[in-house]
Amino acid sequence: MTALAYGISDTLVLAKRSLLRIPRQPDLLVGFTIQPILFVLLFVFVFGGAIQTPGFDYVDFLMPGIIVQSICFGGFVTALGLSDDLKKGLMDRFRSLPMTRSALLTGRTLGDVVTNVFQLVVMIAVGLLVGFNFSSSVGEVIAGIALCLLIGYAFSWVFAFIGLTASSPEAANAYGFTILFPLTFVSSAFVPVASMPGWLQPIAEHNPFTYMVNAVRALFLGIPAGNDVWLALAWTLAIIVVFAPLSAWRYRRVVAR
Amino acid sequence: MPVAVETSRLHKSYGDVRALRGVDLRVETGSVFGLLGPNGAGKTTAVRILTTLLAPDEGSAHVAGFDVVREAAKVRQHIGLAGQYAAVDENLTGFENLDMVGRLYHLGRGRSRERSRELLASFDLSEAGDRLVRTYSGGMRRRLDLAAALVARPPVLFLDEPTTGLDIRSRIGLWDAIEALVSEGTTVLLTTQYLDEADRLADRIAVIDQGLVIAEGTPDELKAQVGGERLEIHLCDGDLGDEAVAALASIASERPFLENGTVRVPVAERRGTIANAVRRLDEAGIAIDDISVSTPTLDDVFLTLTGHAAEQEAEEAEAPAR
């Protein structure tokens, strides 16, 4: 086999390992199934009535936002897993094997793509049950789903960096949520930006997360997207281009001790 | 391949801490080599360099004939590593752990599965093989960890403190497993802070302290360095120690001495010594509470070589930099 074939095989072996963990840890399983469902129900039935979204039913406005948010947090398994491997000495075992070393990172992030697909299916199913309608062409819906998965992949690299930087899985958890929660809430995901205080609006408008949500919303609801799809794509690719090498660098540093 | 592991003047520092200060080791193929020393002596650092996890600051090392820095990938194809932290994935079953390692050694799907089942059986883990590792006891985890190091039948095996933290029954089980491996021709380099472990398993031992090899030889050679056998006598009346020393001087090979109320008498010949000593003390009117002949242990070696006891040092030492 060639080095590339070994690299792919190693990545798949480790992606499988990353995925096997999820059904076996009840907290992760809840995080990937019940939690997003609960979020949809809470927003639609509890907050929804109080939030004005001119031109949209709230459930239509909400679903693209909440889907993108859940997908972003999907990469959390990578942070948790890498941080755990460092703490428990597994990294040493892997690095003493004749395997492709980058597979430790690519395997994790590839595993996340699979969890993200699963999450997407759960969220869309729940959304349809509570009254969400796709009102665009099949091609646009597929493009929207593809964009969601790409966004999820980009955030997996952010989480890889967090997992390799945090001192423990608990710290990784804290960093991840402290950074990402404000980012996802100060955006157009749950409420129209126009409803925010004046000083907050420019921040929310230029939040990359807002571009991503607007792009997916445009693709799912068939409304004019303007430049949002291209800006979302550019931001997503930029995150990968920055955080993949940053994670690789961090990985080399953290194991060279 | 006559030499399995060879290092030359290995140096490694972590900031101001000089973990290795010029270490030379030589491990013959098919032998068990013990690297013995207290916590923080540099044992783990040496193993991490030899298993390509860490680059040395200075010096060179060859494992299975390959340079650990320039030919690291080749080295990794010839080694197995079992660490002191039982590096197995808790969220996988025992079988899944071994199979994953087999696939990462590129054994191929069928071969990897077959080998995993085989190893589970030989480490008495067949029944537990399909259970998640987080349900395993400490001893089972260590056995699985050792099995994982053996998946690809590596010619050179590194065991970093394989039994630290295990109860005595698990330790003996692991020792038996290691001895079985050695009989199949695997070269083993093991680090330990347990002197009895090195004594039982190793053909040769290097004693390492503060980053330097301070002695090397077979267990018997090291023991010979601290002298031969000696009598240990507890007196009924501890105040008579000096009189006892005087009475026993003529049968001793070196001057007898008092230590913690026990009279210790180095002797050249084991046979008849006790009878001799009893007679002399009886003549001097000194009553004996207990008398025995003791063979020097590696504890004595350590104390003689370093001026401090190994176990005590291990408890006081800071955790090693990792």
Image (cartoon, coloured by chain):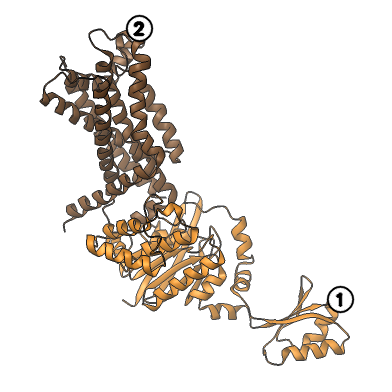
Q: Determine which of the numbered discs, if any, sits on residue B237 in the image.
A: 1
* Mark 2: amino acid: Gly
Q: Toward which corner of the image does residue A197 lie, by quadrant?
A: top left
Q: In the picture shown, does residue A19 fall above or below B120? A: above
Residue B115 pos. (x, y %): 30, 66
Q: Toward which corner of the image does residue B194 lie, by quadrant?
A: bottom right
Identify the residue at image location x=30%, y=48%.
A104
Mark 2 nearby-residue class (10 Å; few <14, some 14–19, many ≥20): few
Q: In the picture shown, does residue B172 fall above or below B14? A: below
Dot 2 corresponds to which residue? A198
Q: Secondary structure at mark 1?
A: loop
**Quarter placement of the N terminus of chain B:** bottom left
Q: Colour of chain A?
A: brown
Count of all numbered marks drawn on residues in the image: 2
Residue B322 pos. (x, y %): 46, 51
As drawn, which residue projects farthest toward the right? B285
Q: Which chain is orange?
A: B
Image mark 2: chain: A
Comparing B268 with B90, the one in front is B90
Q: Is residue A224 left or right of residue B276?
A: left
Image mark 1: chain: B
Identify the residue at image location x=27%, y=65%.
B114
Residue A236 pos. (x, y %): 23, 29
Q: Is residue A53 left or right of residue B203?
A: left
Mark 1 nearby-residue class (10 Å; few <14, some 14–19, many ≥20): few
* Mark 1: amino acid: Asp
